[in-house]
Image (tube, grey):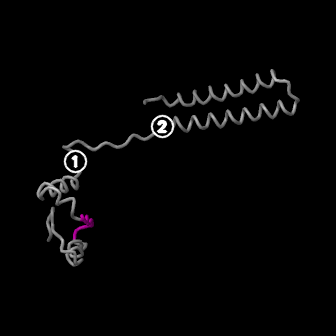
C-alpha cells in the first residue's frame, strides 16, 4: 500500500492528541484529588506517546523486495547454471552438490577443485 511520508506522522499526531484530550477531559470530569489528576494525565500522555510511537513503527516504510532482472539482462552466473541444468537429465542437477569457485585468473581455482578428491564434473565454463 503506497503511503506518503507524512501520513504516518499525521496519524501519530492524531493519536497523541486524542490521548492528551482524553487526559484533559477525564481529569476535569472525574472527582479526583490534585495528585490523582496529575497521575491520570501523566499516565494517559505516556500511553499516548507509546501508542504514537507504536503507530509510527507499524507504518514505517518497508523496502520492496528486489525483483529479478528481465531475461535479456540476466546475470551471467544464473545463465550458466540454467544451461548446466538443461544439459543434465531431469532431477540430476538438483541431486548433485554445486561448488562455485570465484577468483581472479591464475589464482589456482581449477587446481584446488581437481585435487579436492571429489571427482568433480565440469558443467559449465572451461577448465584450463
Quarter where residue 2 is shown: top left
Tell me, yes or no, whether the two marked residues, 1 and 2, touch with CB atoms within 8 Å: no
Left or right: residue 119 versus residue 13 is left
Q: Residue at x 21, y 78 (%)?
A: 115
Q: Residue at x 62, y 25 (%)?
A: 14
Q: What's the mark number on residue 89?
A: none
Which quadrant holds the C terminus?
bottom left
Query: Helix, strand, or loop for circle 2?
Result: loop
Q: Position of residue 18 (x, y in %)?
A: 67, 25
Spatial CA span between label 1 and label 2 = 29 Å
Task: Tell me: residue 92, above or below residue 21.
Answer: below
Circle 2 crowding by C-alpha within 10 Å: few under 14, some 14–19, many from 20: few
Query: Helix, strand, or loop for circle 1?
Result: loop
Q: Position of residue 81 (x, y in %)?
A: 19, 56
Q: Position of residue 113 (x, y in %)?
A: 22, 73
Q: Position of residue 56 (x, y in %)?
A: 57, 35
In magenta, the rendered stretch is 97-105
Which quadrant holds the N terminus?
top left
> What residue does disc 1 label?
74
Task: Tell me: residue 97, above or below residue 119.
Answer: above
> Is residue 103 on the magenta stretch?
yes
The overriding secondary structure of the stretch rendered in magenta is: loop
Left or right: residue 66 versus residue 11 is left
> What residue does disc 2 label?
61
Q: Residue at x 25, y 72 (%)?
A: 107
Amino acid at each position: 500500500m503506497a503511503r506518503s511520508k507524512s501520513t504516518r506522522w499525521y496519524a501519530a499526531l492524531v493519536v497523541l492528541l486524542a490521548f492528551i484530550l482524553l487526559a484533559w477531559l477525564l481529569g476535569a470530569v472525574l472527582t479526583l484529588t490534585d495528585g490523582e489528576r496529575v497521575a491520570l494525565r501523566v499516565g494517559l500522555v505516556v500511553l499516548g506517546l507509546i501508542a504514537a510511537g507504536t503507530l509510527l513503527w507499524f507504518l514505517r516504510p518497508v523496502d520492496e523486495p528486489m525483483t529479478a532482472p528481465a531475461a535479456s539482462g540476466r546475470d551471467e552466473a544464473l545463465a550458466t547454471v540454467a544451461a548446466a541444468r538443461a544439459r543434465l537429465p531431469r532431477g540430476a542437477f538438483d541431486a548433485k552438490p554445486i561448488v562455485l569457485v570465484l577468483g581472479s585468473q591464475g589464482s589456482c581455482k581449477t587446481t584446488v577443485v581437481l585435487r579436492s578428491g571429489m571427482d568433480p564434473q565440469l558443467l559449465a565454463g572451461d577448465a584450463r
